[in-house]
Structures are given as C-alpha cells and as structure tokens.
Image (cartoon, helix red, strand yellow):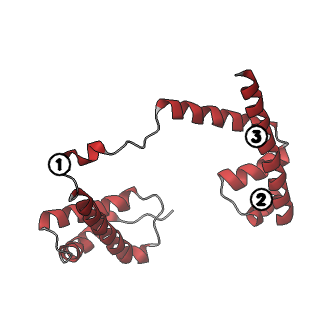
C-alpha cells in the first residue's frame, strides 16, 4: 500500500488545483471546497498509486469532483425546492429485514464452506476472499494452477448444491 505525504502535496498543489478548478467557472468558495474534498479523498483512499503519479491523480480527482458538482446542479435545476430534493430520494441503505436476510445467507454459506474438505475450502477462500489468481494459489499450496482451478470448480459445485439443498429444506418447513 502506497502512502503519500499529504501535507507536502497540499502545500505544493493546493494553489494550482484551486486555479484549475476555478477555470471551470466555479466561485472561489466552491473551488476551495472541491480542492479540500480532493485532498480528503487522497487521505481516505486506502490504495493509492505510486507517488510519482500524485499530480495527475490529484488533478483527475479534482476534475471528477467538478463534474459531480455540475451533475448535481443539473439535477437540482429540475426540482422546485432544491433544499428538499435529497430528502425525496430513496435511501438505498439496507433495511433491517435485508440485513437479517444477508446475515442468514452468510451463515448458510459459512456452514457450506465448513463442510468442504480442507483442500477445496483453502482454494475457495484464497480465490473468493483473497482475490488470488489460480497461479498464485497453486504456488501457495504447492499444486499446479490447473489443479487449483479444478478444485475451485468442485468447491463451487458443492457449495451451490449445499445452498440449494438448504433452501429446499427451508421451503419445505414453511
């Protein structure tokens, strides 16, 4: 994970970014907010490119924030009361029922994974949770990548069948 010295970047690029954003026909206070948000994004981003790409990353982020601002403005121009506009938008946060269902599904998946033979479960977890390639999995487990792939196929088949069987059992109970 790359970390940038945000203080140095701020001192180096703040004024130039402000001018860059103001050239997009924004007031100085909006431009200043966008520049601040640009640096907040850098601080909040867990995976940054190498430091040598910092300047282009900052300008691209600032430009994207300007574009987002104009999109919001365009949407709000169609609303009679812009202050209330965002309160009318549906909340896409999961409701308690969706949260309960997701937790139940995770428990079912965990049960299915626990039932897998260890050699299949290891491949499944490395691929699906760790995001590893089959080549990397093969190296870690000391097996050919084709074996890692075939184990993944077998693991997915078993997990899918277990989840379907569990669903059938639950449907029969209802």
Residue 149 locus on image (x, y percent): 81, 60
Q: Earlier in the sequence, mark 1 or mark 2?
A: 1
Q: Is residue 100 above or below residue 17?
A: above
Q: Earlier in the sequence, mark 1 or mark 3?
A: 1
Q: Quadrant of residue 118?
A: top right
* Residue 132 as seen in the image, left or right of residue 118: left
Q: Mark 3 or mark 2, which is nearer the start of the sequence? A: 3
- Asked if 119 appears above or below 106 in the picture, the reply is below
Q: Position of residue 84 (x, y in %)?
A: 21, 44
**Does the image show residue 141?**
yes
- Does residue 159 appear to the left or right of 77 in the view shown? right
* The image quarter in which residue 18 lies: bottom left
Does the CB distance between marks 1 and 2 fall below 8 Å? no
- Name the residue beneath numbered marker 2: 140
Residue under numbered circle 1? 81
Mark 3: which secondary structure?
A: helix
Could you say which is closer to the camera, residue 8 or residue 111? 111
Give neighbour class at mark 2: few <14, some 14-19, many 20+ (Cα, 10 Å): few
> Mark on residue 113?
3
Q: Are circles 2 and 3 on residues that touch, CB within 8 Å?
A: no
The one of 152 and 84 positioned closer to us in this rendering? 84
């Amino acid at each position: 994970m790359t970390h940038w010295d945000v203080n140095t970047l701020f001192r180096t690029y703040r004024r130039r970014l402000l001018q860059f954003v103001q050239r997009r026909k924004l007031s100085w206070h909006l431009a200043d907010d966008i520049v601040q948000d640009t640096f907040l994004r850098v601080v909040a981003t867990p995976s940054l490119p190498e430091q040598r790409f910092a300047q282009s990353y900052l300008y691209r982020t600032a430009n994207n924030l300007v574009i987002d601002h104009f999109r919001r403005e365009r949407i709000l121009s169609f609303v009679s009361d812009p202050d209330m506009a965002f309160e009318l938008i549906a909340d896409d946060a999961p409701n308690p029922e969706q949260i309960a269902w997701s937790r139940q599904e995770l428990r079912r998946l965990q049960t299915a994974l626990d039932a897998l033979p260890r050699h299949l479960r290891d491949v499944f977890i490395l691929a699906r949770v760790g995001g590893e390639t089959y080549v990397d999995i093969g190296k870690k487990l000391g097996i050919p990548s084709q074996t890692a792939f075939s184990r993944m196929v077998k693991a997915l088949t078993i997990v899918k069948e277990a989840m379907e069987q569990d669903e059938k059992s639950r449907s029969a109970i209802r």
